[in-house]
Image: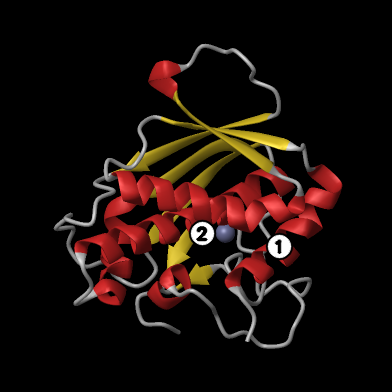
Amino acid sequence: MLHVARLAILALSASLALYAEPKVVLYFDALPPEILTDQQMKTEFSALTEPLGLHTEWRTLPARSGKGELGRLIVVRLLGDCVTTSDAASVESGEPVASVQEVDGRILPFIDVHCDTLVSLVRPAWKDRTPYEKRRLLGRSLARVLAHEVYHVVGQTHDHAAEGITKARLNSGELTARAAQIAPRSFSAPAESPASTSDAASTDGR
Ligand SMILES: [Zn+2]
């Protein structure tokens, strides 16, 4: 049993060793409206990436001043309702929870998170939880989706790991659990190299 964080470190290390800049500035069009979700997203993301020496600044586009913008700028859009009270309809397995864009073989620094799909995917994992716990779990899942996409952007790679949060498909348990069980394989053996830059959600846990 290894922590998801450990997997992220392994996977991100591979690309950061070659491409990393020490600092990433994540520009959101708007942060998650639930404060606890926002806080948990930032805490979990930092826990995943700071051990790699990747430091993150969180900013919002409406407040952009341009001051102190050192490092790689990545724009993040949270599409749909990124709240635990969302009544987003259930999604089909394979719907993307996030995506990046590619032009001429280069992955652009724009990440879209499809919140309705994400909420629908992780909602079963917070059944019977308190509103407080739901917000924490949504924040945690947002952080893992973001770390996955930042891995693509920073590493300029479509590769996916066989296990962990840089897998091509993540289910609700992997997005919300404190720990994840993995096969004793290195991430260096990609599960697949898809042509698509969208990342699929798995609603059936397989
Ligand atoms: Zn991916």
Give the image quadrant in which the ligand numbered 1 is located.
bottom right
Name the residue tied to disc 2. 144
Label 1: how many Cα within 10 Å (few below 14, some 14–19, many 20+):
many
Which amino acid lies under the numbered mark 2 shown in the image of this protein? Answer: Arg
Whether residue 203 sits left or right of residue 51 in the image: it is left
Whether residue 90 sits left or right of residue 4 in the image: it is left
Task: Name the quadrant of the N terminus.
Answer: bottom right
State whether residue 77 is above or below residue 186. Answer: above
Q: Tell me if the residue at label 2 has its CB under 8 Å from ligand 1.
A: no
Whether residue 170 sits left or right of residue 13 in the image: it is left
Name the residue tied to disc 1. 9
State whether residue 116 is above or below residue 92. Answer: above
Residue 121 at what x, y percent from top left?
Answer: 32, 68
Label 2: how many Cα within 10 Å (few below 14, some 14–19, many 20+):
many
Task: Name the quadrant of the C terminus.
Answer: bottom left
State whether residue 181 is above or below residue 189. Answer: below
Q: Residue at x 50, y 70 (%)?
A: 169
SS at mark 1? helix
Residue 36 at what x, y percent from top left?
Answer: 33, 50
Q: Residue at x 70, y 23 (%)?
A: 70
Tell me if I can see residue 136 in this picture: yes
Mark sitting earlier along the chain (1/2): 1
Tell me if I can see residue 198 in this picture: no
Whether residue 179 sits left or right of residue 81 in the image: it is right
Which label is found at residue 74?
none
Q: Give the color scheme: rainbow, by chain, secondary structure or one colour.
A: secondary structure
